[in-house]
Image (tube, grey):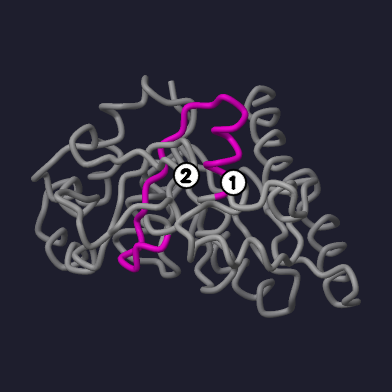
């Protein structure tokens, strides 16, 4: 039975998609069966997995609205060796169309339930806003992985996200919890980064992942080639960090 995790942060530009795609590829290298769900209308995770979002016959949009199912809509990332439920700009319209549907917050949960036996991990890349799409991700998940930069504004946004997770846990999904905080785009030369990192460890303790993802040019270049960073340049520091993060995730799940 798959463990289902959202990669979420209400702040944009914090490396959610980079984390989702590279964690999926990293777990695949560790012989885990992985499904990545792209819940962002920009479709960046889809492109980063090497899938052409303009040629999709079915996507997460059709799945959410009941016009298709995951087995039909999913694709395989040849560059990452994982399955992906892709997205494109059509998904932006789902927000409005889902308002009138029954059980609208749990459409994704019901869809994923049909394939949970086929995977070890299901990762959900959420958009950078508390929307109906993000709510579907949080309702489907067992836990939340929060990528964040070690800077002041990131701390401000974190408290909002933690409050949101608490509300969803209380009203819609009692299984939901924070799995951990992942420090990304980390620059050890900056005093502020070190200070914020220390604050996180002090306040959240073992909820902070040991793995730290460094700021890395190769990770940023990889999506333009339709590849996860861990396969684009396996020897880069960023790729090696995500492989280590995948191993830490597997270890953490076995101890849960």
Query: Alpha-carbon distance for marks 1 and 2?
Result: 7 Å
Is 130 left, or right, of 103 in this rendering? right
- The reply to whether discs 1 and 2 touch (Cβ–Cβ < 8 Å) is yes
Q: Is 207 on the left or on the right of 97, as rendered? A: right
- Image vertical order of residue 172 relative to residue 92, above or below: above
Q: Is residue 192 left or right of residue 19?
A: right
Q: Secondary structure at mark 1?
A: helix
- The correct choice, above or below, for 10 with respect to 177 in the image is below
Residue 207 picture location, percent across and down: 72, 46
Residue at 77% across / 54% down in the picture? 237
What quarter of the picture does the C terminus occupy? top right
Expressed as whole percent of the image width and height from the top left, the position of residue 255 reads 69, 24
Please give the name of the residue rendered at 45% of the width and 57% of the height, measured from the top-left corner: 226
Q: Position of residue 118 (x, y in %)?
A: 37, 22
The residue at the point 24 percent across, 68 percent down is 89
**First reached walking from the N terminus: tag 1 or tag 2:** 2
Residue 231 numbered mark, or none = 1
Q: Which residue is mark 2?
A: 79
- The image's mark for residue 248 is none
Q: Which residues are magenta?
A: 22-44
Is residue 186 a member of the stretch shown in magenta?
Answer: no
């Amino acid at each position: 039975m798959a463990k289902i995790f959202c990669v979420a942060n209400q702040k944009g530009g914090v490396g959610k998609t980079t984390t989702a795609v590279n964690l999926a590829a990293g777990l695949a290298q560790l012989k885990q069966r992985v499904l990545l769900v792209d819940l962002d209308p920009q479709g960046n995770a889809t492109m980063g997995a090497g899938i052409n979002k303009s040629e999709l016959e079915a996507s997460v949009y059709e799945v959410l609205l009941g016009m298709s199912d995951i087995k039909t809509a999913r694709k395989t990332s040849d560059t990452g060796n994982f399955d992906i439920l892709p997205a494109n700009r059509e998904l932006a319209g789902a927000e409005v169309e889902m308002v009138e549907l029954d059980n609208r917050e749990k459409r994704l949960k019901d869809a994923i339930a049909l394939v949970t036996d086929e995977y070890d991990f299901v990762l959900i890349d959420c958009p950078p806003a508390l929307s109906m799409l993000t709510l579907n991700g949080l309702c489907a998940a067992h836990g939340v992985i929060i990528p964040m930069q070690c800077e002041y504004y990131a701390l401000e946004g974190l408290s909002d996200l933690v409050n949101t997770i608490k509300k969803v846990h209380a009203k819609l999904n009692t299984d939901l919890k924070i799995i951990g905080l992942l420090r990304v785009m980390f620059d050890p030369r900056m005093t502020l980064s070190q200070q914020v990192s220390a604050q996180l460890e002090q306040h959240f303790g073992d909820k902070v992942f040991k793995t730290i993802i460094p700021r890395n040019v190769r990770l940023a270049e990889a999506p333009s080639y339709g590849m996860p960073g861990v396969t684009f340049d396996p020897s880069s520091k960023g790729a090696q960090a995500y492989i280590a993060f995948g191993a830490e995730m597997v270890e953490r799940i076995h101890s849960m």
